[in-house]
Amino acid sequence: MSLRLRLIVLIAMVLAASLSVGGVVASLNASRSVQTELKSALLVARQMIASGTALLESSADPKRDLEHLIAAFKGNRHIRVRLTGDAEAVAAPPAEQAAIGDVPAWFIRLIGVPAERAQIPVTVHGRDFGTVVIETDPHNEILEIWDKFADALLVLALFSGATMVLVYFFIGRALRPLERMAAALARIGAGDYGVRLSGRLPPELSKLRDSFNRMAGQLADMDAENRRLNEQLLTLQEDERGDIARDLHDEIGPFLFAINVDAANIARRIKEGRTEQIPDQLASISEAVGHVQKQVRAMLGRLRPIGLAEFGLAEAIGNLTDFWHRRYPGIRYTVEAADEIDGFGGVIESAIYRIVQECLSNAVRHGRPQAIAVSVRLERRTDMDEAVVRVADDGRGMPDSAGPGYGLIGMGERVKAMGGTLAIASEPGQGTVVTAVIPLPGGQRLARLEQVGAP
């Protein structure tokens, strides 16, 4: 069932409940009103009969005057007066007709006012002239209430019908912006982030429209940024492939050619029986193979950090600090890591490793620090945990005129592509602090603090 029909059904139920409660209250009031009216009419009739019969004591013709007294009640809407005895006379109320149909039996039962009767014997000078019977007749009073009730019911039915029609069209008009928004969401789902909503709306829907437009704008910006990052990624991939191809051609290719030449010379000398130079050529082959292995390890190190997959992120970061400690033993290296940072996932671990690698390289090559502190910790949030990577040194800092290099720019784009943020704080003579925050699907607990190296 649509929202429009649900609202109409709800309004109809409220009107029906209101009508039921109002009908019950009206019937109770009507019953009391009819009962009060009939009692008053009965009391007045009894007083009139009592006064009239008292005057018969001085009447020349009591029978005639008694009949006139009974006839005086003709036209009374609520009282039926009847004289019983030798001379009978009846004064009945007029039978009125309902304006809208006959009074239903259920309505008469709902009012529920029974007829009342009173009897007054008439005796004049010891002579019995019969008995005057007075009866209340609620028909006309109930008929009057039924006419009022039917009129009110008709007005209410017309009002309810008009209300339903107005509500139907008004809700349809009010829901039209939501239909446009649903169509716009479908377009966004199809990848069209340029769609926007416009037009005058109520305050509640205008806030929703503004939020939708902001969301669409942010999605458009994110889509443009993703396209730019994808293009840059493709460019970097091509550059990296070019570097690998150049290294293979310039570094490995000549040594493979030399190995091939040495192997051919060895085969020729063996065939010719000259074996005295074979050991020198074998040594040359071994030297060439060693150089090739060294170059291959360097290339693999660029493609995938050595030790990261085998020993985990914490061990790989430790190997980085050991690498620089052997070359710069005068720097104190401090590493603070979480016990379970190796469970962050391959992509996140690789990003953290590259961040630490770039920061350590920049610090020892340009900062001339005395101490470098590396921290990889977990910060819990209500919706998602975050890995916080912080590398701080006490070196010379970055000059005011110097901007971030290609390494820091690439690092920032790597973090941004993962939904994180990168902050660089540096002042001349005050050192440099690089902080990267990367969202995580789950949390880890912090662990120990260990010292690596000493000044």
Image (cartoon, rainbow, N blue to C red):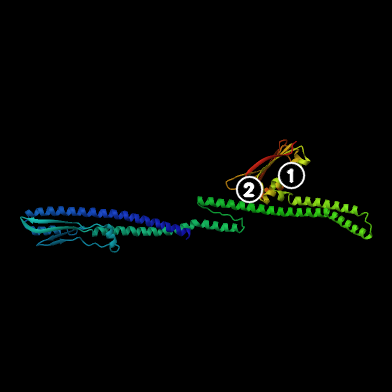
Q: What number is the disc on residue 439?
A: 2
The total number of labels drawn is 2
Mark 1 highlights which residue? 320
Residue for point 39% across, 58% down: 160
The alpha-carbon separation of the residues under discs 2 and 1 comes to 24 Å
Quarter of the image containing the C terminus? Answer: top right
Instruction: Tell me: residue 354, above or below residue 111.
Output: above
In which quadrant of the rendered view does residue 115 lie?
Answer: bottom left
Left or right: residue 93 compared with residue 305: left
Q: Nearer the viewer, residue 316 or 161?
A: 316
Residue 289 in the image: state x and y as whole percent.
Answer: 84, 53
Residue for point 85% across, 54% down: 255
Residue 304 in the image: state x and y as whole percent.
Answer: 73, 51
Residue 17 in the image: state x and y as whole percent.
Answer: 37, 56
Residue for point 91% across, 55% down: 278
Looking at the rendered structure, the kind of residue marked 1 is Leu
Q: Earlier in the sequence, mark 2 or mark 1?
A: 1
